[in-house]
Image: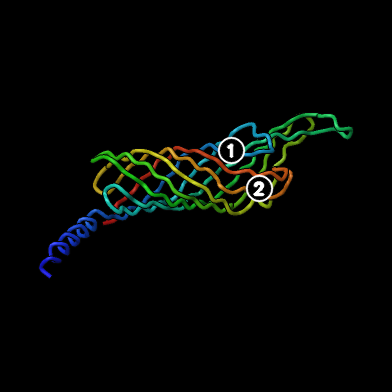
């Protein structure tokens, strides 16, 4: 028992130190993003501009490692070309079609933080997205009128992929942290149903954004 006592004291000291460090932080985040799709069959002619906004929850395991999750509303999409042909097969004109995809996204990342007052960090982990709605728009040209169509059935509801980023956090006052993060998402599932948009090939979401966040420490 006497030999075990120092070990018990050491384990209790480590546990007590970890308990003092561990904190729960709640916050909000948002900012602009840019997105497109990785594909092997359709022609992507440009990126779509969108935004992401949501709430966050971070549990600080120790001074180095944290687990962060949240719920974001993420507006992404892509642009491809649509070719209009005559009855005899001749090309009349080529027009851009913009596809806007609105997701609810749940990221779950492991974060590593460095520094004393100003904190640098990097994080990575999976994300899970649920498609709320999808819309296709072409501005029209010449005698071709503009079109605005609901494309919710053209895309799969579930999207799963990897998310990661790096950034810096600044303490504003006790318990409040201002954070700036550059983040990227890479889809791991094909998002398109078998339709004229994808021509039966696989397409995956890819996006990047610059997020500004505020977190409050819950003691």
- Label 2 neighbour load within 10 Å: few <14, some 14-19, many 20+: many
Which mark is drawn over residue 192?
2
Residue 68's place in the image compared with 84, above or below, is below
User: Could you tell me which secondary element the residue under label 1 belongs to?
Assistant: strand
The residue drawn where x is 73% and y is 35% is: 82
User: Could you tell me which secondary element the residue under label 2 belongs to?
Assistant: loop
The residue drawn where x is 73% and y is 33% is: 140
**For this view, does 83 lie left or right of residue 217?**
right
Residue 85's place in the image compared with 187, above or below, is above
Residue at the outermost front position: 3
**Percent from the top left, x then y, of residue 42?**
69, 37
Residue at the outermost right position: 88
**Percent from the top left, x then y, of residue 151?**
68, 48
Which mark is drawn over residue 127?
none
**Percent from the top left, x then y, of residue 34?**
53, 36
Which mark is drawn over residue 36?
1
In this figure, what is the number of numbered marks? 2
């Amino acid at each position: 028992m006497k030999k075990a006592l120092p070990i018990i004291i050491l384990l209790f000291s480590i546990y007590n130190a970890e308990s003092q460090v561990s904190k729960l932080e709640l916050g909000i985040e948002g900012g602009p993003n840019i997105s497109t799709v990785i594909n092997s069959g359709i022609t992507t002619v440009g990126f779509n501009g969108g935004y992401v906004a949501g709430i966050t929850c971070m549990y600080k395991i120790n001074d180095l490692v944290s687990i962060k999750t949240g719920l974001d509303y993420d507006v992404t999409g892509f642009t491809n070309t649509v070719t209009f042909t005559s009855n005899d097969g001749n090309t009349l004109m080529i027009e851009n079609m913009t596809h806007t995809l609105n997701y609810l996204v749940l990221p779950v990342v492991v974060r590593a933080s460095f520094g004393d007052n100003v904190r640098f960090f990097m994080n990575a982990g999976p994300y899970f997205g649920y498609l709320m709605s999808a819309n296709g728009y072409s501005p029209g040209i010449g005698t071709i009128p503009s079109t605005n169509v609901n494309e919710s059935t053209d895309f799969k509801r579930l999207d799963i992929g990897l998310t990661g980023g790096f950034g810096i956090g600044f303490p504003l006052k006790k318990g409040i942290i201002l954070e700036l993060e550059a983040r990227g998402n890479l889809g791991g599932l094909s998002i398109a149903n078998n339709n004229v948009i994808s021509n039966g090939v696989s397409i995956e979401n890819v996006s990047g954004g610059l997020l500004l966040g505020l977190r409050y420490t819950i003691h």
